[in-house]
Amino acid sequence: MRPDFVVRRIGFYVLICAITLFFAVPMLWIASAPFDASPGLGVHWPDWTLENFRKTLEHPYAMHSMVNSLLICVTTAVAVTAFAALASYALSRVRIPGRDALLYGLLLLSSVVTGTAAMVPIFVMMFQLGLIDSRFGVALVMTGGLLPAAIFILKDFVDAVPKSYEESARVFGASTGQILRDVVLPVARPGLATIMVWAFVNSWGNFLVPFLLIRSIEKQPGAVLMQTLTDEGGSVNLQVLPVFSLLFSIPVVVLYLLVNSRYGFRFHGGIKS
Amino acid sequence: MTSASAPVRGRTPARDVAGLGVGRAFGFVAPAFLLIGAFLIFPALWTIYIGITNYRLTGVEAVSPSIVGLSNYTKALNDALFHNALWLTMVFVLGSAIIGQNVLGFTLAWIMRRTRPAVRRTVEAFVLLAWILPSTVVAYLWVAFFDRDGGTLNGLLGTQGTAWLIDYPMACLVVFNTWRGTAFSMMLYSSALQAVPPSQLESARMVGASGWQTLRDVVFPHIRGHVLTNTLLISLWTANDFSPFLLTKGGPNHESETVPVYIYNVALQGGELGYSSAISFLLLIANLLVSLVYLRLLRRRS
């Protein structure tokens, strides 16, 4: 019995190590290459330098694309949160005819009409509207794509806000605007923060929409610029890309950790595009 | 105060506690639904129309497209490259989602149940990181990993000069997507496994059931629903995933051109907007069928 147990224990840890290595090894490069004096595509112990960071900061488009990403994603996150909050509140508190069918349809829409399935009509539509090469256009398309899921998640949050708060506020003569601003909004804040972070992270990583709609390099967000630089190749880009990958990943990881530590990880089944 | 409190109907009356009224409620809902209508519903419907025209990106048909009926669909029936894309998508979904993410995700959830918290957190951190990093970053990591000259994989295996992404593009994509998406299955199965009563696991151990027997006869019946919904969701996402484009662009010679990449190449490289819309519509229908099954399962469970 005893040796059997030991063998099993060893096998168990070998398995865990193997799986961890499988996940960790491809990531090691992003930790070593940015600081390496002669960055290559393989992982090796770096010849420490910060030269690559200087090169990246001086790159004509690198930092600019971060600003573009920020512009697009903040617009998207704010629009998604604001519109989803209004809609989910109304859907939670007022019985609009056909509400249940509407919510069911929303859930269906968010999974059926994916970016890939709709890329051709969206491209044609934006082309005819003259919104090709517009960062605002990219934000609009992303907002439309994220809203159904956002309304669905937020409605759960709003449903959980006790109605008695609003009732008592009303008894004391608060107007609808006051109730929304001073009662509902503060109580629903964790939900709103979660949605805002979720929308930001989703649009930050979105490659397809800006790739389809943005033409000029000075308007490209980071996700698309990386692809442009990869296609260009060259030794300068090999210095810039590792640093850029690292910098571009930081906001996503930080926001994730923030939401995770603040509100705990909430498992919203099926919500990730 | 408005007296237009909502008419109470149905089983769960939503009381209009803020005094919103139906009129203002519609106003609240309107902006969101206008955007959804414009950028989600309209494009989906418009695909049907563009799909029956010969609309092109450039040339005469770009200015005045004409309706060609179902000929785009009959073309798809006989298009060897489309059949190739369908086949590759099936391989991709089966290999990386149905088998890869499912099995690895479940294995992780199962073996992590009783490991020390420190070990568990470390492993989960890496798995989650693979899931939350931006797709272009992740794609570039793997392009570097697979690289012919100096890539980490060749360094580890001692196979210098093997161009993995060119010689074995589909295998690379399957491994890549398993790595990328396992976190979701792991989390879903972790929470599903908590629903398995410990007493049943204990009695299975008492009667001397092997690990495999315990899984099959005790654990599986409890999580059957989760396995099904998880499989449907990850299959849907994988079939619609555009990141193969970032690794291989569909090449070499269409060897890794899954349906999403094929749609892009036909529409924007080839300029055939009409034909690519027809294919997009087929993808929409497939998505719709899978989603309906999924929602059906969800409803039955709740």
Image (tube, grey):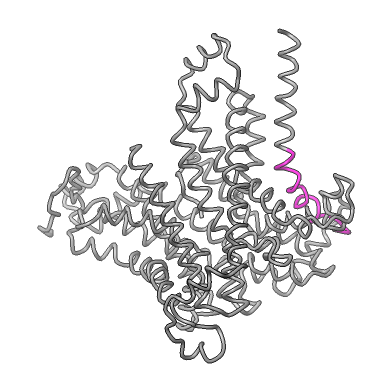
- Where in the figure is residue B271, as x and y percent of width and height? 58, 80
Residue closest to the eye, A66 or A238: A238
Residue closest to the eye, A135 or B200: B200
Residue closest to the eye, A113 or A184: A113
- Where in the figure is residue A141, as x and y percent of width and height? 47, 69
> Disc count in the image?
0
- Where in the figure is residue B246, as x and y percent of width and height? 67, 62
Q: Is residue B87 left or right of residue A103?
A: right
- A77 inside magenta stretch: no
Q: Is residue A269 left or right of residue A244?
A: left
Residue closest to the eye, B3 or A273: A273
Q: Is residue A15 above or below residue B38?
A: above
What residue appears at the point 62 percent right and 47 percent down from the top-left corner? B96
- A27 inside magenta stretch: yes
Q: Is residue A12 above or below residue B248?
A: above
What residue appears at the point 12 percent right and 53 percent down from the top-left corner? B7
Q: Is residue B263 left or right of residue A174?
A: right
What residue appears at the point 73 percent right and 69 percent down from the top-left corner? A229
- Which quadrant holds the N terminus of chain B? bottom left
Q: Which segment did they paint magenta?
A: A21-39
Q: Main secondary structure of the magenta part?
A: helix
Residue that sits furthest to the left in the current view = B3
Q: Is residue A80 left or right of residue A246?
A: left
Q: Is residue A55 above or below residue B4?
A: below
- Which quadrant holds the C terminus of chain B? top left
What residue appears at the point 81 percent right and 63 percent down from the top-left corner? A239
- Where in the figure is residue B293, as x and y percent of width and height? 40, 48
Could you say which quadrant of the image residue B149 lies in?
bottom right
